[in-house]
């Protein structure tokens, strides 16, 4: 798969997609090249309520308003913790038959619970009729397919296994800012030097960011095949390989800031931006945080794959669904149409730090970091993120997060591994 840099073009639903008139409601091409679905509004439910994530949403809304000028966008965003607060609110609304027009969810296993509960409609026919199955790369389609169906439209591709570094802080600590680390042990040796210099070696935030760190450590120590095996039962959570990874995780957590439970990811990332911390492990939505403060890639900050994961793309994708019982399905589908479009994805991803899922989006003006992500996704093995819904169901992730929270409050590796192994056994038995 290759992400192509091409000039985007306005898209109007025409003869090639006449079949969608029935599925999407009556449409008409406007002078701006977009399509409309009649009067109404669409509530878009996300956790993009602030910062660079809100900027990305605003950019996408701008394209939606151009393409569907007769529809009103209603912002249903709920802030907090990688979507944990939003998911709780959403669960309550779905249980009381009060769905929004569409809601954000990570593509992949996170959708399992919604599918089994009958909360979302399959979109497979729309993929074929709209040609989305041709616009999205095969490697992405393989990641988001659920038992032969597609249930959401991806707005982007994010990479999770990224270390963000402050070169000035590293130099102050006597560490080579251009150092390359073959594995976690080599990296830990430099974290010790940074700690001795009085700088926070590794910034981190609340529970979900700790799960994020854990998944990259598991990937680093287990490798692609064994990491993937954690989610299908072919890798034993009680095995020695996982023990070693959890011991590495414990060591890394010891190099983090003591106030981690009171911080979300922007606060932890800001410590690297300010130079009070040397490193942070975070997905590439952090790119937008650096860019928004006029930081220059390669000078003010650098990135590299989490040591031990070079040559692997730890994948997640934000996506949007069609809820069962959506108040205005035609308006919901209009939003999905914009999300899938080259124009929408170009605007959204340029602001958010991710890369487009749509192959026709123009990426020629994207920044240096994003170009590295484009290259890696095109050529490297792809694995699914735990912390961000691609690898495990919501219920499984919730149980893992609870175990990580208890461990961070003073647990031990043996108890943590017992909890994780018991959770995996229960989840895989369902």
Image (tube, rainbow, N blue to C red):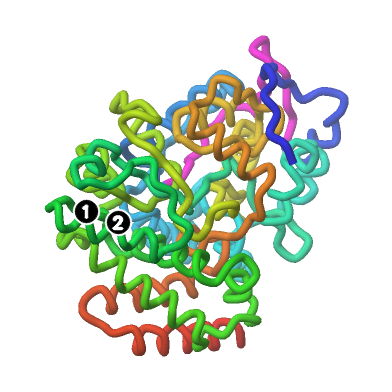
- Residue 356 against residue 122 in the figure, above or below: above
- Residue 304 against residue 429 in the figure, above or below: above
For disc 2, the marked residue is: 190
Q: Which residues are magenta?
A: 25-46
Give x and y (percent) for residue 141. Answer: 72, 50
Position of the N terminus, as image quadrant, is top right
Q: Is residue 68 visible?
A: yes
Q: Nearer the viewer, residue 56 or 365?
A: 365
Identify which residue is drawn at 32% across, 36% down: 51
Task: Find numbered disc 2 in the image and state the secondary structure of the residue it sits on.
Answer: helix
Give x and y (percent) for residue 112. Answer: 60, 67
Residue 249 is drawn in which quadrant? bottom left
Spatial CA span between label 2 and label 1: 6 Å
For disc 1, the marked residue is: 194
Give x and y (percent) for residue 205. Answer: 27, 57
Position of the C terminus, as image quadrant, is bottom right
Circles 2 and 1, Cβ within 8 Å, touching? The answer is yes
Classed neighbour count for the residue bearing mark 1: other residues with Cα under 10 Å, few (<14), some (14–19), many (≥20): many
């Amino acid at each position: 798969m290759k992400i192509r840099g091409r000039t985007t073009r306005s898209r109007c639903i025409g003869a090639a997609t006449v079949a969608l008139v029935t599925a999407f409601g009556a449409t008409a091409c406007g002078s701006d090249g977009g399509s409309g679905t009649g009067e109404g509004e669409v509530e878009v439910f996300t956790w993009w309520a602030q910062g660079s994530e809100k900027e990305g949403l605003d950019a996408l809304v701008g394209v939606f308003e151009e393409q569907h000028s007769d529809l009103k966008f209603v912002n249903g965003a709920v802030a907090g913790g990688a979507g944990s607060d939003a998911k709780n609110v959403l669960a309550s609304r779905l249980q009381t038959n009060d769905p929004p027009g569409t809601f954000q969810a990570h593509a992949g296993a996170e959708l399992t619970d919604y599918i089994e509960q009958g909360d979302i409609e399959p979109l497979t026919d729309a993929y074929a009729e709209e040609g989305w199955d041709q616009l999205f790369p095969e490697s992405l389609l393989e990641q988001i397919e659920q038992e032969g169906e597609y249930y959401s439209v991806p707005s982007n591709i994010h990479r999770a296994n990224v270390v963000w570094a402050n070169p000035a802080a590293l130099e102050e600590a006597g560490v080579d800012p251009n150092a390359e680390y073959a594995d976690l042990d080599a990296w830990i040796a430099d974290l010790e030097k940074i700690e001795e210099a009085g700088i926070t070696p590794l910034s981190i935030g609340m529970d979900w960011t700790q799960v994020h760190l854990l998944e990259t450590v598991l990937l680093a120590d287990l490798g692609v095949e064994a990491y993937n095996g954690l989610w299908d039962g072919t890798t034993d959570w009680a095995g020695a390989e996982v023990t070693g990874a959890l011991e590495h995780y414990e060591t890394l957590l010891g190099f983090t800031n003591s106030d981690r439970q009171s911080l979300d990811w922007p606060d932890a990332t800001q410590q690297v931006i300010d130079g009070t911390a040397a490193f942070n492990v975070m997905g590439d939505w952090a790119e937008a945080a650096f860019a928004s403060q006029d930081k220059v890639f390669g000078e003010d900050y650098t990135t590299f794959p989490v040591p031990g994961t070079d040559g692997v793309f730890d994948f997640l994708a934000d996506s949007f669904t069609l809820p069962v019982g959506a108040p205005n399905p035609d308006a919901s589908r209009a939003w999905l149409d914009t999300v899938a479009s080259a124009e929408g994805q170009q605007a959204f991803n340029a602001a958010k730090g991710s890369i487009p899922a749509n192959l026709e989006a123009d990426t020629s003006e994207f920044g240096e970091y994003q170009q590295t992500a484009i290259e890696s996704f095109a050529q490297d093995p792809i694995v699914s993120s735990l912390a961000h819904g691609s690898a495990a169901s919501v219920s499984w992730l919730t149980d893992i997060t609870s175990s990580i929270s208890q461990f961070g409050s003073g647990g031990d590796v043996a108890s943590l591994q017992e909890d994780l192994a018991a959770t995996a056994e229960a989840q895989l038995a369902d």
